[in-house]
Amino acid sequence: MAKASKIRDLAPEDDVSRALHKIVQVRVREIRRYQAIVLRAPSPEAVHDFRVAVRRLFSLLKIFSQYFPGDSYEEIRSVMKELLGLFGHVREIDVFQEMIGESSLARKHPQQPFVRRIYADKQSIRNEAAERSLEYLRSLENAGLWHRLESTFS
């Protein structure tokens, strides 16, 4: 489970920019931690944890959008939405497969052609969706997005 890291060193005298810098750094570190895991092996748990970390940062960005300099908020918002959409598709298939696997039909008749076919079809779609998601994620890393985001408020 993707536990949120505590934000340390926040002080009442911090201005909004300084506080956001500290918070964004922690959230980006979380994303990078889960990104490394999902890039190594995009298991259902890794995909879920990565999405949770991205959603945490996305929520923060929406709440504090007016503090982002220039057009940086729109770029980051767009990227976050794309990440959530791509990995969301993978996650939906994971949930569906879990539901099928736990269904009474699958438990009673795991070798039924219907159960095997639908599971295999969804697995193929999941693999393709995961690869597209991972390609996009690698492109963000190569473009230095996380580094730029961390330095937005410094």
Image: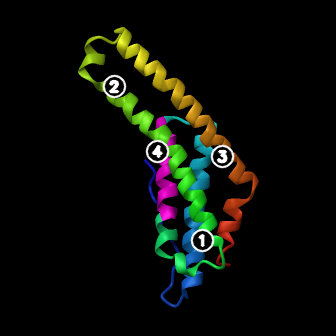
Where is mark 4, residue-wise? 48
Quarter of the image for residue 150 reads: bottom right
- Where residue 140 appears, as percent x and y from the top left, is 69, 53
- Where residue 29 appears, as percent x and y from the top left, is 60, 60
User: Which residue is at 34% across, 12% downward?
Assistant: 110
**N-term mark: 2 or 4:** 4
Assign the magenta stretch its main secondary structure. Answer: helix
Relative depth, front residue between 85 and 27: 85
Mark pair 2, 1: CA separation: 40 Å
Do callouts 3 and 2 mark residues in contact (Cβ within 8 Å)? no
Residue 130 lies in the magenta stretch: no
**N-term mark: 2 or 1:** 1
**N-term mark: 3 or 2:** 2
- Rendered image: mark on residue 73: 1
SS label for mark 4: helix
**N-term mark: 1 or 4:** 4
Where is mark 2, residue-wise? 100
Stretch in magenta: 44-58
Q: Amino acid at mark 1?
A: Tyr
Q: Amino acid at mark 2?
A: Ile
Please name which of the two marks, 2 or 1, marks the residue nearer to the observer. Answer: 1
Q: Extreme bottom residue here? A: 13
Classify 10 Å Cα crowding around label 4: few (below 14), some (14-19), many (20 and above). Answer: many
Q: Amino acid at mark 4?
A: His
Q: Amino acid at mark 3?
A: Tyr
Please name which of the two marks, 4 or 3, marks the residue nearer to the observer. Answer: 3
- Where residue 70 appears, as percent x and y from the top left, is 66, 78
Classify 10 Å Cα crowding around label 3: few (below 14), some (14-19), many (20 and above). Answer: some
In-image side of 146 versus 116 (left or right): right
**N-term mark: 1 or 3:** 1
Where is mark 3, residue-wise? 136
In-image side of 52 versus 134 (left or right): left
